[in-house]
Image: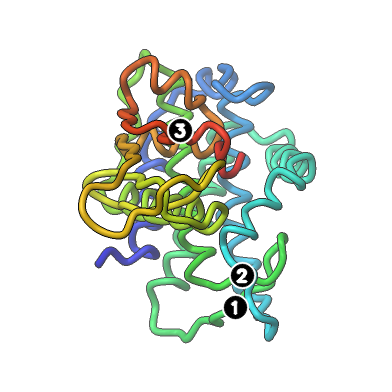
């Protein structure tokens, strides 16, 4: 079983190494995210890691909000998240932000992978969340931004997406999909990492055993992009990145899961 904390540290260090190889001029290049250049996106990655460190210092005794509900609040707080990234970026140069990111990653690695007992529930900016869920959603953050960077600078070698991180991403997003849309009318497969059943729109027939009547299958990166609003269901189907069989095999009403 993949350890999400190890996957987070591994993928974060991979992104850090890629950013560290960029010339300073590349940090002012635009990214695929509107109004964000590479420097701004690097600042956001600093916020992701530094924010996790801060959350580790805020244990909570409240019952954790289920992860599929917690992530709904991302869209609600989008302006606040963007403002935090802007504040973190400030007037810092790209290399200065990379140094800040390196320090935050190593401190987080020491906390997560060390022998110190960690609180099972954290008071996150979006409410109380289970530590395990918070680690998993940070993996999603880091992987999707690694993909954002690769697509933004297509003339450079892409950021390697680590298999363990892709596994955590796929399982986490599949769990969120099933939690937000409970049911068993559609089976969603992200081989080789995850498969989940969910219900969207008209419940239709319920799958119990054998071949399900409605199946959606796609790869981990395409599922990640659809789940985070980087691409749409229709675009992914038209380009052949999604295979859908069955009258109700349509996730367009459920996506994106978070953005």
Residue 19 is at least partly visible in this image? no
Q: CA distance from mark 3 to mark 1?
A: 35 Å
**Image quarter of residue 32:** top right
Of discs 3 and 1, which sits in the foreground? 3
Residue 121: assigned label: 1
Where does label 3 land, which residue?
250
Mark nearer the N terminus (3 vs 1): 1
Q: Quadrant of the N terminus?
A: bottom left
**Image quarter of residue 23:** top left
Q: Secondary structure at mark 2?
A: strand
Q: CA distance from mark 2 to mark 1?
A: 6 Å
* Mark 1, other Cα within 10 Å: few <14 / some 14–19 / many ≥20: many
Q: Is residue 195 above or below residue 96?
A: below
Percent x, y for residue 185?
42, 49
Q: Are marks 2 and 1 in contact (CB under 8 Å)?
A: yes
Instruction: Give left or right: position of 233 versus 243.
Output: right
Q: Are marks 2 and 3 in contact (CB under 8 Å)?
A: no
In the depicted view, which residue is nearer to us: 259 or 55?
259
């Amino acid at each position: 079983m993949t350890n999400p904390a190890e996957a987070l540290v591994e993928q974060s260090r991979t992104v850090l190494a890629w950013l560290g190889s960029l010339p300073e001029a590349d940090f002012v290049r635009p990214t695929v995210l509107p109004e964000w250049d590479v420097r701004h996106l690097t600042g956001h990655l600093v916020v992701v890691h530094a924010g996790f460190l801060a959350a580790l210092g805020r244990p909570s005794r409240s019952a954790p909000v289920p992860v599929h509900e917690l992530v709904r609040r991302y869209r609600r707080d989008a302006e606040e998240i963007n403002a935090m990234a802007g504040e973190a970026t400030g007037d810092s140069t790209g290399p200065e932000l990379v140094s800040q990111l390196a320090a935050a990653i190593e401190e987080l690695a020491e906390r997560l992978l060390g022998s110190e007992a960690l609180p099972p529930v954290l008071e996150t900016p979006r409410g109380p969340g289970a530590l395990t869920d918070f680690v998993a959603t940070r993996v999603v953050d880091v992987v999707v931004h690694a993909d954002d960077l690769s697509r933004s600078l297509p003339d450079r070698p892409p950021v390697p997406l680590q298999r363990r991180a892709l596994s955590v991403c796929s399982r986490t997003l599949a769990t969120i999909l099933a939690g937000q849309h409970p049911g068993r009318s559609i089976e969603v497969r992200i081989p080789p990492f995850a498969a989940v059943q969910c219900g969207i729109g008209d419940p239709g027939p319920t799958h119990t055993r054998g071949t399900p009547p409605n199946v959606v299958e796609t790869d981990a990166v395409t599922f990640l992009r659809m789940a985070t609003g980087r691409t749409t269901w229709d675009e992914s189907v038209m380009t052949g990145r999604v295979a859908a069989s069955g009258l109700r095999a349509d996730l367009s009403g459920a996506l994106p899961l978070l953005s």
